[in-house]
Amino acid sequence: MSLLINGARLADGKVTDLYLSDGVLADPASAPAGVERFDADGLLALPGLVDLHTHLRQPGREDAETVDSGTDAAARGGFTCVHAMANTTPVTDTAEAAEYVQALGEREGHCQVQVVGAVTKGLAGEELAELGMMADSKAKVRVFSDDGRCVSDSLLMRRALTYVKSFNGIVAQHSQDPRLAGPTACCHESEWSGRLGLPGWPSQAESVIVARDVELAALTDSRVHVCHVSTAESVEIIRWAKKRGVKVTAEATPHHLLLDTPLVASYDTTFKVNPPLRTSEHLEAVREALADGTIDIVGTDHAPHARQDKDHPFDIALPGMLGLEQALAVVIEVMINTGRMDWPTLVQRMSSTPATLGQVPGQGRPLAIGEPANLVLVDPTARATVDATASKSRSRNNPYHGRDLPDPVVATYWRGRKTYSR
Amino acid sequence: MRHLLGCADLSATDAIAILDLAEEMQQVQSRPVKKLPALRGRTIVNIFFEDSTRTRTSFEIAGKWLSADTINVSAKGSSVSKGESLRDTMLTLDAMGVDCFVIRHPSSGAAAQVASWVRAQVVNAGDGQHEHPTQALLDAYTMRQHFRSLGNDGFAGKKIAIVGDLLHSRVVRSNVLLQNLLGGEVVLVAPPTLLPTGVENWGCQVTSDFDSVLPEADIVMMLRVQRERMAGGYFPTEREYTAGYGLTEERLRELKPGAGICHPGPMNRGVEISSAAADAANSLVLDQVASGVAVRMSVLYHLLGSDEGAMR
């Protein structure tokens, strides 16, 4: 497929033509006369977005999401690469399991699927999974995470951090002290948890693990990535650790940028997520950290759930919410439209830095001649009311349903192929 | 008001109307024939996902004395263990044409969720650690009767001490919200580990010094403390809990004359309340139980009794 996109504005403000040919960006001057054209006047062209934190649910819960439907949602959201988390059934904790998911991605993906391997066997937090074999497999796993569960054992975390150094791996931690925030914890510990009678999830249950992990990263001189930072305390610790030169990176989810604790007062389980929605002072700290680079990337934590797993009382329903389709919309609303962030920084947070952390060649690259044709066309002013039933995901746990938000994604191209258009 | 989900949804007018009608309902209790025809032909399902003797029986009697058809469903552990969601369980029963669900559930918010799913009206008979509005209403009713027996009316200036495991108690949340409407002055007493987060903003006094409260309290309401809290590290031993927060015989003597003793039950005699206190002349524990039926009759009548089923 060949396509000439005319007059697109890049993140840095330059207006240019982009010629997509054979999966790469070629010189627009070389485009033949009759080539298909797309008039991108008024639109931004950004490198395809990269998500370091996606739950595709396949294998195991194909009723909630599949590689096909999840990556379709990703393309709808402007993503050209997602990282499939390991907490599937079976768990991605062997080379075989990793290659299976990778092959599914190659066959059915509407974007590139990079595999995240489990840190511990069966996510049980007891013994290391076969990290090296996953790294050496065809899936070339570089990111390891027990996400959904915390690697809470300090010694095991130390070993994991040390072990992955030989293949330049990165451990992505779900920071939740399992004693301070146990399995029933479901509401930010605050006046809200007290009033609603919901088991509290104190922000310190996150920050004590973040503090421990940055110390372990310093001890092992290895790299730790903090998933879904949700609290002001974690932000402060990460800021301090970075100042000391610790190899720590961090991510913020769209929902922890926009949605706050009072939403759970309705006991609507769509708003149950782990870590929980926090209060406004935490949201403000996370936004500020994403703007100043203390938080390096946006990761969606796209977590589809079938209706029957959400139609339970609040403390029993599964935690998690959709994120891929509205991630860019939320970041535009919270960060760009408020003047907190400019477009080049957004590209770093949502494309180039996540691609670097995930070590994905060909993703997060600048839109320049010779580069892979992974890009998203964005209308920065379009808005729409979010409709959960219109989702490409198989699930409907969309926390933005009914909200007026930017509706930026006009078209997505992956390896030169159109994977979504409005 | 279509449902009674919590005292948070009540206005002072609603609350007083319920208490006033309960007085009329209580007179029915002293009649040889206790039935009123008010809710004839209406169907009330008491669905309890958690064990309860007094609340379930109280609601059942209340419904029957109003001539409603009351059906008890013990659903403890049934839905999740069979893989059925709470929503499906409730929609199934709703489809049978039920007029009102009285629901008890171990999860906070369950009654509100159910109310958003079903056609029937919903009365919250206790949801997790959130609210238990009819308990607070019957407590208020009992207190009001008690104050009247001492020759004064109303809650203004009355000090109501609520003592015990406030963190895990739905009774305390409903009582504080209701007393904020009625004008009673609530003092919460608990070890710091058993205080809910943000309790300082509930509009009542909070202390861990029970003894300082005793001489001023008009009502002392003792809450059950569950033994499993000890395993959770909330306090070291039963003995230490009783020493600090039990209504012992010694503390009983420090109460001012006429102070009423309440307990929503079931009581742990010897732990949070001594037998001397439970059986004292000024113990209102059995009055609470008796009030329960009258107050629940009043609530059911308010919700279901008028043509539109609206509480006015």
Image (cartoon, rainbow, N blue to C red):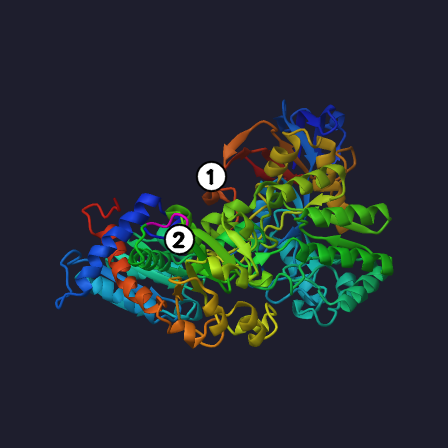
Report the amino acid beneath label 2.
Ala
- Where does residue A366 sit, x and y in percent of width and height? 77, 36
For the image, the number of numbered tags is 2
Q: Give the labeled residue for mark 2.
A: B112
Report the amino acid beneath label 1.
Gly
- Where does residue A230 sit, x and y in percent of width and height? 65, 48
Subunit that carries the residue with mark 2:
B
Separation of disc 2 and disc 1 at Cα?
21 Å
Residue sitting nearer the eye, B279 or A313: B279
Subunit that carries the residue with mark 1:
A
Residue sitting nearer the eye, A124 or B134: B134
Res. B71 image quadrant: bottom left
Report the span colored magenta.
B154-158
Mark 2 lies on a secondary structure that is helix
Q: Residue at x 28, y 66 (%)?
A: B290
Residue sitting nearer the eye, B264 or A308: B264
Where A15 sits versus A325, above or below? above
Q: Give the labeled residue for mark 1.
A: A402
